[in-house]
Image: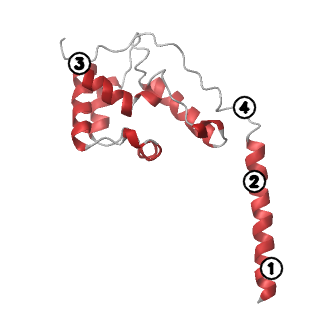
Amino acid sequence: MKVSVRRFCKVFLIAFAWFAGLIVLAQLIPYGRTHANPPVIKEPAWDSPRTRELAVRACFNCHSNETRWPWYANVAPFSWVVEFDVNVARSVVNFSEWNRPYELAASSGLSVRTGNMPTVKYRMAHPEADLTPEETLDLARGLDATLSPDIAR
């Protein structure tokens, strides 16, 4: 019995050393730590300050040029995921560059209403983005009013 425990510990320590070595080597890959926040060019004409406030809490970290980069965005492989997610989010809808069209902008309220946005993994890491049901409905309605092309303002 003692031999099998020793063997298990030896295998575990070797596996842990390999894992730690891979994490250290991953830090040499430069992707994911640029943390570029281009200037804010133009925001949409928000229907109310409340909509903007909720959007800042739940959306702006990924869907704007005002990203607050968390500490883990400097550690690979988490930095790769964060950088990729922000780049994709900004390409879909960027509230800081409202001088160009976004094909999916009009669906933003629906995405919030159905629970697709903010994503579960984002809400887990950012509790401030976990809106109450009332806030979720307010944000969805506000995004519909702000971003729907068929609503005259």
How packed mark 1 is, by other alpha carbons closer than 10 Å (few <14, some 14-19, many 20 or more), is few
Query: Marks 2/4: CA distance?
Result: 18 Å
Disc sitting over residue 47 in the figure: 3
Give the secondary structure at mark 1.
helix
Query: Marks 2/1: CA distance?
Result: 21 Å
Query: Marks 1/4: CA distance?
Result: 39 Å
Q: Are marks 3 and 4 in contact (CB under 8 Å)?
A: no
Of pointers 3 and 1, the one earlier in the residue sequence: 1
Q: Nearer the viewer, mark 1 or mark 4?
A: 1
> Dividing the image into 4 quarters, which one contains the C terminus?
top left
Type of amino acid at the residue the image marks with label 4: Pro
Disc sitting over residue 20 in the figure: 2
Of pointers 3 and 4, the one earlier in the residue sequence: 4
Instruction: Give the answer, above or below, for where 6 lies relative to 110.
Output: below
Type of amino acid at the residue the image marks with label 1: Arg
Where is residue 148 drawn, in percent x and y? 25, 21
**Count of number-bearing discs:** 4
Q: Residue at x 60, y 26 (%)?
A: 35
Query: Marks 3/1: CA distance?
Result: 66 Å
Disc sitting over residue 6 in the figure: 1
Of pointers 3 and 2, the one earlier in the residue sequence: 2
- Report the residue marked by disc 4: 30
How packed mark 2 is, by other alpha carbons closer than 10 Å (few <14, some 14-19, many 20 or more), is few
Where is residue 120 drawn, in percent x and y? 41, 46
How packed mark 4 is, by other alpha carbons closer than 10 Å (few <14, some 14-19, many 20 or more), is few
Q: Residue furthest bottom?
A: 1
Q: Nearer the viewer, mark 2 or mark 4?
A: 2
Type of amino acid at the residue the image marks with label 3: Asp
